[in-house]
Image: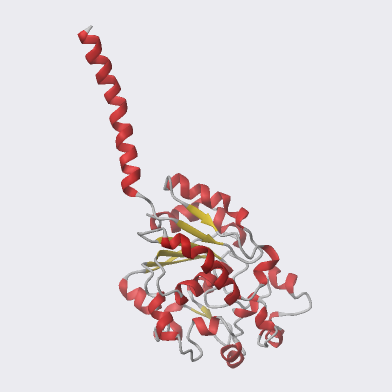
């Protein structure tokens, strides 16, 4: 009997100790919360695959897809969206002593830049910009044809660089390489974020932006919507519509809002994936494992 008792106790321990170890490991690791901000015409329900990828690779992670400015409401001006998303995200930040991670898709990447630039006490660790037009947009895409069926990209500046145009989100980052004076002087959002126009808050915004620990810029040549696709990594057209990459852009060379500083710190990362169309970035498992997974610890 004694021998049987010892054997049963040994078997129970063999099962119990690994289980306790796994529980303790999960408690110690305590993955940081992940906040996801959607893009133009999206809603929170579009990100179920991304939530699943995160929960499979980082079990127990608190993942929040902010349910604001869905579908047609995503056309609201970006500063309005920044304030709305900021109010929803701030309590998550306050409850995360070790900080949060951002995954911000398409137009949402620009919203997230507005948040981290204007929020002095944010605690964003990894900011993953997922195929977002960070340097602006200039292209005859399906989105443009849907919104402005009678307008070509070469003529959209007539609308976008007006007070009325700046009430439409896409016009807040419409960057016409042939009308840069109009863009700089009339863009109420991107030109200010990029410090391309004098802004009394630029020093403070740069300081806030540089509080992020990592900036991961994800994009690829088969996107089909972000135009040029290199805008997802701060490249953009010159006035001949030749793409100039980030490292040769004035906003990088002049370190206008902190990109060059991030690069010098080793905290600016580019992740390029071919073969991914714009609407599939957040549901592509290869993209997740290649460009996002390691930055969510």
The image's colour scheme reads: secondary structure
The residue shown at (57%, 50%) is 48
- Residue 285 is situated, as x and y percent measured from the top left of the image, at 51, 50
Q: Residue furthest top?
A: 1
Residue 39, by quadrant, is: bottom right
The answer to which image quadrant residue 282 occupies is bottom right
Q: How many marks?
A: 0
In the image, farthest residue toward the right = 150
Q: Residue at x 38, y 52 (%)?
A: 31
Which residue is depicted at the point 37% across and 72% down? Answer: 211
Choose between 211 and 129: the one closer to the eye: 211
In the picture, measured across the screen, residue 73 lies left or right of residue 56, that is right
Rendered location of residue 205, percent (x, y): 43, 80
Quarter of the image where the N terminus is located: top left
In the orientation shown, which residue stands out farthest toward the left? 2
The residue shown at (44%, 49%) is 61
List x then y, in percent, for residue 296: 40, 56
Image quadrant holding the C terminus, namely: bottom left
Q: Is residue 1 above or below residue 248?
A: above
The answer to which of 179 and 86 lies nearer the viewer is 86
Q: Is residue 229 visible?
A: no
Query: Of 122 and 297, which appears nearest the observer?
Result: 122
Q: Look at the picture and state if 148 lies above or below 96.
A: below
| Drawn side of residue 11 relative to residue 163, left or right | left
Res. 78 in view: yes
- The image shows residue 99 at horizontal and vertical percentages of 38, 61
């Amino acid at each position: 009997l004694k021998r049987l008792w010892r054997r049963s106790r040994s078997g129970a321990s063999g099962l119990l100790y690994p289980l306790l170890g796994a529980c303790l490991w999960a408690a110690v690791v305590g993955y940081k919360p992940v906040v996801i901000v959607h893009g133009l015409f999206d809603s929170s329900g579009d990100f179920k695959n991304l939530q699943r990828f995160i929960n499979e690779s980082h079990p127990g992670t608190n993942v929040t897809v902010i349910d604001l400015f869905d579908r047609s409401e995503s056309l609201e001006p970006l500063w309005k969206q920044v304030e709305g998303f900021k109010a929803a995200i701030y309590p998550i930040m306050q409850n995360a002593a070790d900080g949060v991670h951002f995954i911000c898709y398409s137009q949402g990447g620009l919203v997230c830049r507005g948040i981290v630039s204007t929020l002095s006490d944010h605690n964003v660790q990894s900011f993953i910009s997922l195929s977002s037009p960070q340097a602006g947009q200039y292209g005859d895409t399906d989105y443009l044809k849907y919104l402005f069926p009678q307008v070509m990209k070469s003529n959209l500046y007539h609308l976008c660089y007006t007070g009325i145009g700046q009430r439409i989100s896409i016009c807040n980052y419409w960057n016409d390489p042939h009308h840069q004076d109009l863009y700089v002087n009339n863009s109420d959002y991107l030109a200010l974020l990029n410090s391309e126009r004098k802004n009394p808050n630029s020093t403070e915004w740069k300081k806030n932006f540089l509080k992020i620990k990592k900036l991961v810029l994800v994009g690829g040549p088969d996107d089909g919507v972000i135009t040029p696709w290199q805008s997802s990594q701060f490249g953009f057209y010159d006035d001949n519509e030749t793409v100039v990459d980030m490292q040769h852009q004035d906003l990088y060379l002049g370190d206008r809002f902190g990109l060059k500083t991030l690069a010098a710190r080793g905290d600016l990362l580019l992740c390029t994936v071919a073969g991914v169309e714009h609407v599939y970035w957040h549901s592509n498992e290869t993209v997740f494992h290649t460009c996002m997974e390691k930055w969510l610890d």
